Amino acid sequence: MTFNEPWSKKHKKVTSETPFSLSNSFAQPLNSAELIKMAQDRGDNDIVEQFQNHSLEYTPNGGSLDLRQEIANFYGPDINADNIVVFTGAQVALQTAAMALLNNDSHSIVFSPCYQSVQQAPAHAGSQVTEIRLVAENGWQIDPEMVEAAIQENTKYIVINEPYNPAGTLMSHELQKQLKDIAEKNNLHFLSDEVYRLLEHDEKDRLTPMADLYEKGISAGTLSKPWGGCGITIGWLALQDLELRQKLIDVQYFGTSCPSRASEIQAIMTLRASDIIVERNLKIIRKNVDLLDKFFENYADLFEWIRPKAGAIAFVKFKGPLTSDQLGEALAKSGISIKPAYVFSDDHSGFSDYFRIGYGEEKMPKALAALIDFVEEHKQAWRA
Ligand SMILES: Cc1ncc(COP(=O)(O)O)c(C=O)c1O
């Protein structure tokens, strides 16, 4: 197993003290009191009682049944509680899936730039890897011909992330089907990191979960993104393949003894209030995207984006004289954080002028106002 340093480590060092965050990728978090109030408002007093009085013994391997049932409600008829494995966050789920499926003789296909664990979990598990580059010119879309060309005799696994971090873009239903057909024809397991699912800005763009679409499909989800529950630390995998599900639980055994029951109960409370929370978060997101539309209109000669379709993130091109790394350092000195290109790949040579912004939180307009002040201060020099 070879692990690189976390790509976000340097970013965290640079921006540890910044009051204006444009770098978070989650929707607005609730607090515990708000979550409890939502449960009480819908008369769900039993779950509040459980939160206060649950046993602190181990929870079952793979997650408690009541939570797995709540998660299964987000999928179609082929996915029920027995098709879910609960993890202490999606990050752990991605690593565990790779360890359960891959070894040194296997080959995997991943895409870059992307969230580090989506790209690198197969390599961490010892797999040989083909990394396919996504480019802005193609709207950060996957080219199925490149995927077909990358398949080898020992290819076992393909990992995508849709909606896509860092750009907030989304593939079409047709492209999703084409990729699923390629995986099926070649008998590959196909993990789709769908942690931003439900945050489509237009609901008609929402893709079918890979776990519903394909017998060897695996969908990854988490409380962290649509519901802003990052501190709950509950993620999951949904899959039809029950043999693999058992293997996931076996591999998980060596990493996490069990998810905390308090976290599981908070996750249940959140998922039961999903409609209300997601609607509230989409309202914040849409308002913030409107503000960003104006920003990109006003500074079109300096910044450009492919308008995102989902999630709370976008990948922005800086057309001025700095790399995104340099821009990020300068912004951090003014209290503003963004995520430079280096957070999304080992080799960001093709897109070093790109940085990711996040717009899922209520406080985002203040951070955007600080960015606008910064741009006003520097625009003449950049344009010269
Ligand atoms: C694409 C993607 N997958 C997985 C994760 C990890 O999620 P979790 O907080 O549940 O570990 C993140 C978090 O930023 C992410 O962006």
Image (spheres, rainbow, N blue to C red):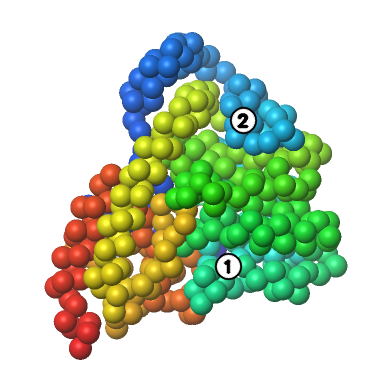
Give x and y (percent) for residue 134: 57, 71
Tell me if I can see residue 227 in this picture. yes
User: Please, what secondary structure does the residue beneath circle 1 have?
Assistant: loop
- Is 48 or 201 nearer to us in this picture? 201
* Left or right: where 263 falls relative to 13: right
Side of 144 relative to 384 (left or right): right
With respect to residue 123, does 376 lie above or below? below
Farthest-out residue, front: 204
Along the viewing direction, whichever of 368 and 252 lies nearer the viewer: 368
Residue 72: x %, y % from top left = 64, 31
Mark 1: amino acid: Gln
Question: In the image, what residue occupies the spot 76% across and 70% down?
Answer: 148
- Residue at left 52%, top 70%? 139
Task: Give the labeled residue for mark 1.
Answer: 141
Q: Which mark is residue 124?
A: none
Kind of element beneath mark 2: loop
Give the answer, above or below, for where 318 lies relative to 126: below
Q: Residues within 10 Å of mark 2 (few under 14, many from 20)?
A: some
> What residue sits right under mark 2 in the picture?
73
Q: Hey, which quadrant is residue 83 in on the image?
A: top right
Q: What is the CA distance from the residue labelled 2 to the residue labelled 1?
A: 29 Å
Image quadrant occupied by the N terminus: bottom right
Residue 267 shows in this picture? no
**Residue 130 located left or right of residue 10:** right
